[in-house]
Image (cartoon, helix red, strand yellow):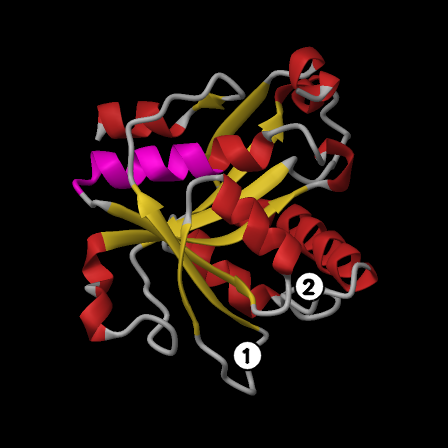
Amino acid sequence: MHTNTLLHPLALRRAEPEDLRGILTLLADTAEWLYSQGVRQWPRGGFGPERIEPLIEERVLYLLDDELRYLDPDESAPPVATIALDGHADPEFWALDDDPGAALYVHKLAVARPWSGSGLGDALLDWAGASAHAAGLPLLRLDCAKGNRRLQDYYRHRGFRHVRTVDLPHRASGALFERHSEDLSTTAFRDLTMAELISA
């Protein structure tokens, strides 16, 4: 595992409105990197605030923070990673025959480039699968770019099954994947969302 995860304690929490700027920066950096790799998964330059603010308002967007950054109150570093997890099945991809309500869906999964290769993407997917399991749902689902074979292979190696590819001319995404939810624990970060569940 990347030494960053050993030297920097990480914590997962829900995104708040004041996090918007850092989230947009991370997603824009990730989109630019994808474009440099020839992948058109996301809009070049990232997403506008109108696409991210609803996720924050719905409380379904999560951030992975480097907790050491709080030692410097002037530092405005973007989050280490983001992930959105919700029950919103994209109707252009998931049909009624798929039983859309049987899963949680991963969106906006991004890891900052300095943390690439650290296993944080794996850990966040495990957390998402455990969240689906805790919600009594049998599946974790996601979609990715139709032409991104490397990412599709990554999901296969992470236990996801390719369901099908939906080829819509106006969508870069459309390769659909799912795996069974499991109660997997991760030691890569502290899950601050657990305290919310306990206090709710």
Residue under label 2: 46
Q: Is residue 1 left or right of residue 86?
A: right
Question: Is any atom of residue 45 visible in this view?
Answer: yes
**Residue 70, how many percent across, how many down?**
66, 22
Q: Position of residue 189 (x, y in %)?
A: 52, 21
Q: Is residue 190 magenta?
A: no
Q: Determine whether label 1 and label 2 are within 8 Å by CB.
A: no
Most foreground residue, 104 or 122? 122
The residue labelled by disc 1 is 171
Which image quarter is the C terminus in?
top left
Q: Which residues are magenta?
A: 125-136
Which amino acid does the dot numbered 1 rest on? Answer: Arg
Residue under the point 65% across and 35% down? 80
Q: CA distance from mark 1 to mark 2?
A: 15 Å
Q: Local crowd at mark 1 within 10 Å, few (<14), some, or many (≥20)? A: some
Extreme residue in the left direction: 136
Q: Secondary structure at mark 2?
A: loop
Q: Residue at x 74, y 69 (%)?
A: 44
Picture layout, residue 132 above or below residue 68:
below
Q: Secondary structure at mark 1?
A: loop
Name of the residue lying farthest toward the bottom: 169
What main secondary structure does the magenta stretch of the protein show?
helix
**Mark 2 neighbour density, 10 Å: few (under 14) some (14–19) many (20 or more):** some
- Identify the residue at horizontal 19%, vertical 64% (top origin): 99
- Residue kind at label 2, given as amino acid type: Gly
Q: Is residue 171 above or below residue 155?
A: below
Horizontal side of residue 96 vs 160, given as left or right = left
Q: Is residue 132 magenta?
A: yes
Rendering coords of residue 165 (x, y %): 45, 71
